[in-house]
Image: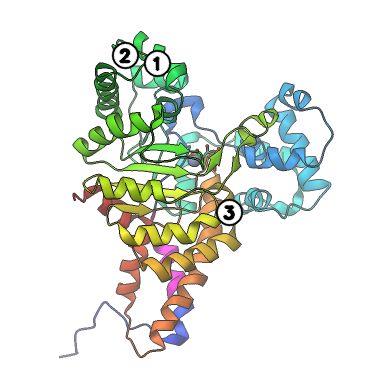
Amino acid sequence: MPEKMSDDMPVLMENLTDTIRKIFNETLITDIHTHLYAPSFGNLLLWGIDELLTYHYLVAEFFRTTEMPYSNFWNMSKKEQANAIWQALFIERSPISEACRGVLTVLKQLGLDTAERDLNAYRDWFAQQSIADHVNRVFEVANLKAVVMTNDPFDPNERDFWLSPAEIDTRFFTSLRLDTLILRWVEIYTMLQAWGYTVDKDLTEETLSEIRRFVSDWIQKIKPVYVAVSLPPQFDFPEHSPRGIIIEQAILPVTKFFNIPLALMIGVNRNVNPELKLAGDSVGTASLRPIENLCEKYPQNKFMFTMLSRENIHSACVTARKFRNLLPFGCWWFLNNPSLIEEITSMRAELLGTTFIPQHSDARVLEQVIYKWEHTREVLIKVYTEQYSKILATGWKLTENEIKRDVANYLGGNFWKFLESKF
Ligand code: FIX
Ligand code: ZN
């Protein structure tokens, strides 16, 4: 009788990079934070070359190349804006920034010829795609299993969808984004009044109870995988301010009740240049004490967090070591560049082993998931080849299935297990 072949294989030092590359290429990803929408949300799902070229990362880079008055740009049609950005960033200069290279990676991976530099030919190609097939293809090329949307009940377009919801593609999960509720209470409490909640500008007991009812209603309506808020670097906790009171007395009890995480995205200074609109946000270094205070005071609540400032990443790793109810995720926004992903992921792997989520895409335009994941994957293969080779060098034996297990956890498992966990 021939010996039964094991379906697991030992990993040898000489095959390590190839094995890790193969595993990363085969592992499907859950993208835990995007600004994408399922096709049934209609125009809210952005896709195609003009959307790719007018991504706010590229708008910011475009204005560095021109003296054009801001208003001229904003008065242009989307196609005209895309033409101007293409001309300035791809033709008159080499497209070497991460956001520019991203457009080229997308074109390449969709089978278009970047050497042609023919914007109208790219437009024609996108115009021929049917959105249903195109979404399938993008998911396949990017290796995606699922994406999490960012769903804001205060966004009038989204509200319309939720008031008479259509079926949602099961690969698209929801998250409840509450920046408006938490950060702009004084401006928006009248909206809650108009929607039938008995609230007042002052955060009285009754008002807080009604805010809890509002958050619970939306959790039941959209079934989010987490509740999220982005916060400025000055965020503190505990804090005697509307945002501090709303988080502590309205959000935390409800997220605890439903056992869903609160995702904190810390370090954004909004609108430092309002002329740039969506492209006008900046970064600031924050303190980790508020997160430590939250995790310590509310050990039965679950928190996810990402920081925008590079200077915060090391202390963020240390904070995560202290609290099992805290899950770090992604290289957010200005940190989503290969040189920084490499530094951040190595640091996290050294301090946190396999217990974090290395990346999310933050894609706003469908096809961006292709480049954001392709560029990240290259870095992860490099970082993990190095990490695994160091343990092999001690004589430790590794099998393919063990690396598969770890990579599957990084690219989705850690997230789904955190959602299941109860402390
Ligand atoms: O707050 C956020 O979720 C940010 O990611 C966005 O608002 C930001 O504009 C972005 O697209 C970053 O990638
Ligand atoms: Zn985002």
Quarter assignment of residue 283: top right
Q: Amino acid at mark 1?
A: Tyr
Residue 73 visible within the image: yes
Amino acid type at image mark 3: Gln
Residue 346 in picture, x, y percent from top left: 48, 68
Residue placed at 29% from the left, 13% from the top?
A: 197
In the picture of the structure, the residue carrying the numbered disc 2 is 199
- Callout count: 3
Q: Is residue 174 above or below residue 369?
A: above
Amino acid type at circle 2 is: Val
Give the residue displayed 42% in from the left and 28% down from the top. 152
Whether pointer 2 and pointer 1 mark residues with C-beta atoms closer than 8 Å, the reply is yes
Q: Position of residue 401 (x, y in %)?
A: 30, 73
Q: Residue under circle 3?
A: 109
98 and 351: which one is in front? 351
Q: Nearer the viewer, mark 1 or mark 3?
A: 1
Label 1: element kind: helix
Instruction: Check mark 2 vs ligand 1: CB closer than 8 Å? yes or no.
Output: no
Q: Residue at x 45, y 72 (%)?
A: 384
